[in-house]
Image (tube, grey):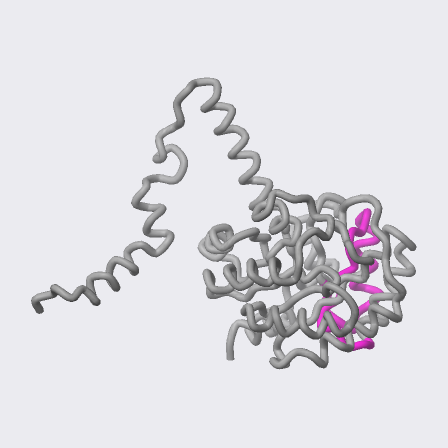
Amino acid sequence: MGRRNDLRRMIEAPGLLMAPGAYDAMTAKMIEAAGFKAVYMTGYGTSAGRFGLPDLGLLTLTEMADNAARIADAVGIPLIADADTGYGNPLNVVRTVQTFEKAGAAAIHIEDQVWPKRCGHMKGKRVIEASDMVDKIKAAVEARRDPDFMIIARTDAIATHGLEAALERAARYAEAGADVLFVEAPLDRDQMADIPKRLPQRPHLVNMAPLTPNLTASELEAMGFRLAIYPGICLAAAVSACQAELARLLETGRQRNIEDWIGSFADLNRFLGADEFSALEEKYRSDRTD
């Protein structure tokens, strides 16, 4: 039993699993500390927060997997990671799956966009042939070494071909062996409700990003979704807070006291595990007299 098995059990159980988006280890620790049972590594947030770049397919497999490894190492809850398109053809997907497995992820999602891809809520998306994506899903399923490592199949075809074509693609991806279906960027409540209702053969993920109607967890659960990701929550909050504090500093010439932000400097150090490291330092001191 481990985090991958935990994730599978939570997704297959009744109810909605909420996974806020982290773009680094610190935000992942905050998500865990807040009480959430899973964390999502956002591709948009990784690109923006780690590299200062837009989500236009500019990052590589190794850069994304490195961030996933840092997040997985920082928390004890399951990690769901954005693996973009799998970074190439089915051979590349094999390496992608095994790399994210080694990084400690519990699940990845792979999308049917062309490469270079772009954020699922940006304009200008294009998708590959459904048959090519079916091959990728089959390769991903066969490549995993841990059967509890979940393969999430994402289609971006609503934007390019409409809802019906997206549902047809998702059904084919389920037949290819995907564990969870992810129909990206539904535009209204009716589209959202149709997705799990018309494709009941697999659990469904919903991405609470800009184009998706901003519904409550109870509303999403009632529609039949099992997993909701909130990729922008930490990034947007950080950007907003940083802009406000930087404007304040420029205007006043003085930063606020740290206690106004986080309680105390000692609280922050405790949150980061400084007390545990100090205890280890004391334990292994060569000049101890006991």
Q: Residue 59 location, x and y as percent?
A: 66, 54
- Residue in the image at 21% along x and 67% along y: 284
Residue situated furthest left in the rendering: 289
- The verdict on residue 199 being magenta is yes
- Left or right: residue 141 compared with residue 70: right
The number of discs equals 0
- The verdict on residue 290 being magenta is no
Q: Residue 50 location, x and y as percent?
A: 57, 48
- Left or right: residue 83 compared with residue 267: right
- Left or right: residue 34 compared with residue 22: left
- The reply to whether residue 55 is visible in this rendering is yes
Look at the picture and state if 30 lies above or below 142.
above
Q: Quadrant of the C terminus?
A: bottom left
Depth order, front residue of 272/189 = 272
Depth order, front residue of 183/286 = 286
- Residue in the image at 46% along x and 55% along y: 29
Q: Residue 94 location, x and y as percent?
A: 70, 74
Quarter of the rendering containing residue 177: bottom right
- The reply to whether residue 18 is visible in this rendering is no
Depth order, front residue of 184/42 = 42
Residue extent of the magenta highlight = 175-204
- Residue in the image at 7% along x and 66% along y: 289
Depth order, front residue of 191/76 = 76
Q: Residue 278 location, x and y as percent?
A: 25, 58
